[in-house]
Image (cartoon, rainbow, N blue to C red):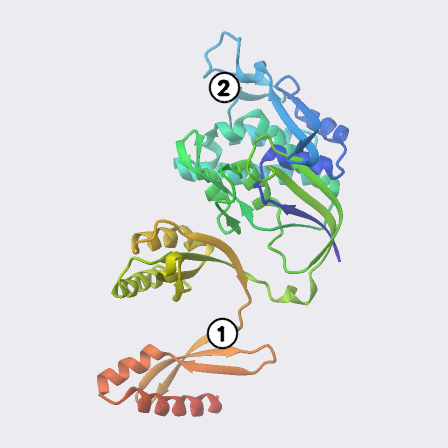
Amino acid sequence: MSRALYFHCHAGISGDMTLAALIDIGVPEEHLRTELGKLELDDEFRLDVSGAMKMGISGTQVRVHQMASASGDNHGHDHNHSHERGHGHTHNHDGSRTYREIKQMIESAPYDQGVIDRALDMFRLVGEAEGKIHDKPLDEVHFHEVGAIDSIVDIVGTAIALEYLKVDMILCGPVELGAARVQCVHGNFPVPAPATSEILEGVPSQSGGLEGEATTPTGAAILKSNVDHFQPQGVFTNETVGYGIGHKDFTVPNVLRVLLGEYDEGSTSDIPPAANYELATNIDDMSAEGFQPMLDSLFEAGASDAFLTPIVMKKSRLAQSVTVLCRAEKLDELAKLLMTESSSIGVRIKPIWKQMLEREIRKVKTSHGEVSVKIVTLPDGGQRWKVEHDHIVAISRDTGESYARLKAKIEQEVHAALDDN
């Protein structure tokens, strides 16, 4: 059994919601304020913590107010001019800082190493994402979202709170991203924001559960940096619940739920599930001939599987449900391809998990040439195998021998060859 923290991100996650939820679950507010004071940025922000309610759910709400001295208001200075603050760090009057400046600030503060490591890793994730988007080295990334004082407080505060709780592991289910568009420094952009998309690569997520930006870059970095298991397969026993109340209004309660309890990974822990995605769309206006080129394109682009299921839609229209399975890194490419190669105008996306048997591809020489054989090892140690269909088809085409007869001969030879080994 392990002491664990479980994030439920059904309405997404942001930095202030995380801080609020961790306070609500038991991190003392005064401890957080004292530790944040080590940054020596008291004249740049004010932290407000209060009870709040969203659609009948009560919890804690946090708001970081940026002071005029941090934003450069009323200084009468050029906003591109930097001046000294706190530990000898600089920042522009618009509240932005570079990654290098933030790193120096955190390393100079008298924190335990655990707080420093967590905070720097979260900032690194966002800095690398922004650097990739703007084609800049990490230390030269100069960005507003994470350079702003509220994100500094959110990220360092989260590192402080997580170190205070001293859990053995952090768990998380699928992350809601939201829908529609968000206004950021890159302009009006579809949700998720570019940095959020980069940070959450490989993280199980879902879209369309609510209208608006549900997960921010800061929230994404908190999860990517700290979560040990996404969509855990073991048994979690809850002891305490905390709610971080968000500032936006959605059609669902805009809250981040965090659970504190015991986690038993169980017997499945030695067979880690692989995170995959399922894409699906229903099509009732394409000719049958059009589906084969579409499926061919999906497989060529890296789909793990793709198949059609006959369905009956409204008004008794006959249709095909197209299902595509893929790894996380192929998700965006295949979703776009599915809509490009078909008449679909939308794709449903959901994370799935599967356990895979150990398998290998072995080349076996036969009297008809070399063939590929897929060999699967069963949980009890036994094996089963299958000759690659395309190889038998190619040999049948080249020799003129019937596929069925050739298949039987090749399988007999493969069986003998594997037994000899």
Residue at x-position 50% and y-position 48%: 206
Question: What residue type is disc 1 on?
Answer: Arg
Question: What residue type is disc 2 on?
Answer: Asp
In the displayed structure image, the side of residue 281 where residue 210 appears, left or right: right
Q: Is residue 297 above or below residue 178?
A: below
- Where residue 118 sits in the image (x, y, percent)? 63, 40
In the displayed structure image, the side of residue 356 where residue 308 appears, left or right: left
Q: Crowding at label 2, few (<14), some or many (≥20) Cα neighbours within 10 Å?
A: many
Q: Crowding at label 1, few (<14), some or many (≥20) Cα neighbours within 10 Å?
A: some
Which residue occupies the extreme front position in the image?
Answer: 315
- Where residue 231 sits in the image (x, y, percent)? 60, 55
Residue at x-position 40% and y-position 35%: 189
- Where residue 309 sits in the image (x, y, percent)? 40, 66
Q: Earlier in the sequence, mark 2 or mark 1?
A: 2
392 or 207: which is nearer to us? 207
Residue under numbered circle 1: 359
Q: Is residue 120 above or below residue 402?
A: above
Callout 1: helix, strand or loop? strand
Residue at x-position 67% and y-position 36%: 56
Residue 94 bears which disc, if any?
2
103 or 321: which is nearer to us? 321
